[in-house]
C-alpha cells in the first residue's frame, strides 16, 4: 500500500511469470522455440469510500494511423484516481485551410481507468488522403449516466440520455506536407498514383530536357562563333599573303625595268 493516504482508486495488476531456468548450451542446429508463461491478476486498491469527481483533459491532436489507415488522434487523459464510466464522445475535425474537409467520429459507452490516457481516433474514411493544412478539432464528452443529470445527449438511436458530467474541447492543429505524404504512402486503402501519372515527374523531365537543349544551344552557338572567327582570321591571313605576293611581284617588275 502507498505510504500516504489517498482518495479514490488505484488500478493496476500483479504479473506472475515462470522463473527462467538455467541456460544450457546446445549444439543443435535449426529453429529453437522457448515457451514462457505469465499470468496477470487485476488489482484495485482503495483506502476509503470517498468518491473522487472525474476530470478529463485533451492533451494533443495529431495525424496517425490505426491498422494502416489514416486517422486523426485526440489524446484524452483522465488525471483523477477514479473511473470515468459510460463515456459518450462526439468529435468533429474541420479543415481551416480547406473548408470542404470534415470528419466525424461518435462513440458510446466508453470507459477510462484512473490516471490513464488513450488516443481517440477520428477516421478520415478509407481511400481518402490526408491533406496538409490547418484544422480544428471540436469535441464534446459526456460521462456518468444519471436520470437526474443536467447534461443531455441524444444517442445513435435517437434516445435522450442524461449525464452528470460534460467536457467540451476545441483545439487547432496543423498537418505538414511531409507528414501527410508519409502517412498516405503507408495507408493500404489509398490508391497510389502511378509514376507516369505524376505531373511532377513529367515536369521534372521537361525541365531536364529544356536544360539540355539550352546547354546544347549555348555550346553550338559558341562553336559557331569560334568557327566564324577562325574563318575571318583565315580570310585576313589570305588577304595579307595576296597583298605580299602582289608587292613582291611589283618589286620584281621594277628591277627588270631598271636593267
Image: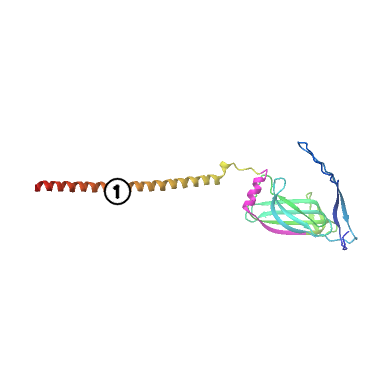
Residue sitting at x 75%, y 52%: 120
Q: Quadrant of the N terminus?
A: bottom right
Residue farthest toward the top in the current orientation of the protein: 29
Residue 92 percent coordinates (x, y): 71, 54
Residue 192 is drawn in which quadrant? Answer: top right
Residue 118, percent from left and from top: 77, 53
Residue, disc 1: 233
The verdict on residue 32 being magenta is no
- Depth check, front residue: 163 or 45: 45
Instruction: Indicate yes or no whether the magenta region holds residue 182.
Output: yes
Of 125 and 2, nearer the camera is 2
As drawn, 35 above or below 100: above
Q: Is residue 91 left or right of residue 51?
A: left
Is 131 above or below relative to 29?
A: below
Q: Secondary structure at mark 1?
A: helix
x and y percentages locating residue 103 in the rendered image: 69, 51
How many marks the image carries: the answer is 1
Q: Residue at x 48, y 45 (%)?
A: 209
Stretch of the chain drawn in magenta: 167-189
- Picture coordinates of residue 64, whole percent (x, y): 69, 50
Q: Residue 78 vs residue 194: left or right?
A: right
Amino acid at each position: 500500500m502507498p505510504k500516504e493516504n489517498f482518495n479514490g482508486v488505484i488500478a493496476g495488476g500483479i504479473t506472475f511469470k515462470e522463473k527462467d531456468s538455467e541456460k544450457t548450451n546446445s549444439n543443435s542446429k535449426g529453429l529453437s522455440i522457448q515457451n514462457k508463461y505469465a499470468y496477470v491478476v487485476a488489482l484495485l486498491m482503495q483506502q476509503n469510500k470517498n468518491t473522487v469527481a472525474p476530470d478529463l483533459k485533451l492533451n494533443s491532436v495529431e495525424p496517425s494511423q490505426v491498422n494502416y489507415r489514416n486517422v486523426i488522434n485526440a489524446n484524452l487523459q483522465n488525471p483523477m484516481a477514479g473511473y470515468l464510466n459510460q463515456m459518450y464522445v462526439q468529435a468533429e475535425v474541420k479543415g481551416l485551410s480547406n473548408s470542404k474537409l470534415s470528419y466525424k467520429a461518435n462513440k458510446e459507452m466508453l470507459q477510462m481507468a484512473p490516471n490513464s490516457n488513450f488516443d481517440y481516433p477520428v477516421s478520415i474514411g478509407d481511400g481518402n488522403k490526408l491533406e496538409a493544412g490547418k484544422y480544428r478539432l471540436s469535441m464534446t464528452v459526456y460521462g456518468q449516466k444519471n436520470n437526474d443529470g443536467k447534461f443531455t445527449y441524444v444517442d445513435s438511436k435517437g434516445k435522450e440520455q442524461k449525464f452528470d458530467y460534460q467536457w467540451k474541447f476545441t483545439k487547432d492543429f496543423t498537418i505538414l506536407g511531409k507528414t501527410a505524404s508519409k502517412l498516405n504512402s503507408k495507408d493500404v486503402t489509398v490508391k497510389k498514383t502511378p509514376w507516369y501519372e505524376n505531373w511532377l515527374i513529367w515536369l521534372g523531365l521537361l525541365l531536364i530536357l529544356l536544360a539540355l537543349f539550352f546547354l546544347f544551344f549555348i555550346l553550338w552557338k559558341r562553336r559557331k562563333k569560334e568557327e566564324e572567327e577562325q574563318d575571318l582570321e583565315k580570310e585576313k591571313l589570305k588577304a595579307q599573303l595576296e597583298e605580299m605576293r602582289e608587292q613582291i611581284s611589283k618589286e620584281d617588275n621594277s628591277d627588270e625595268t631598271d636593267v
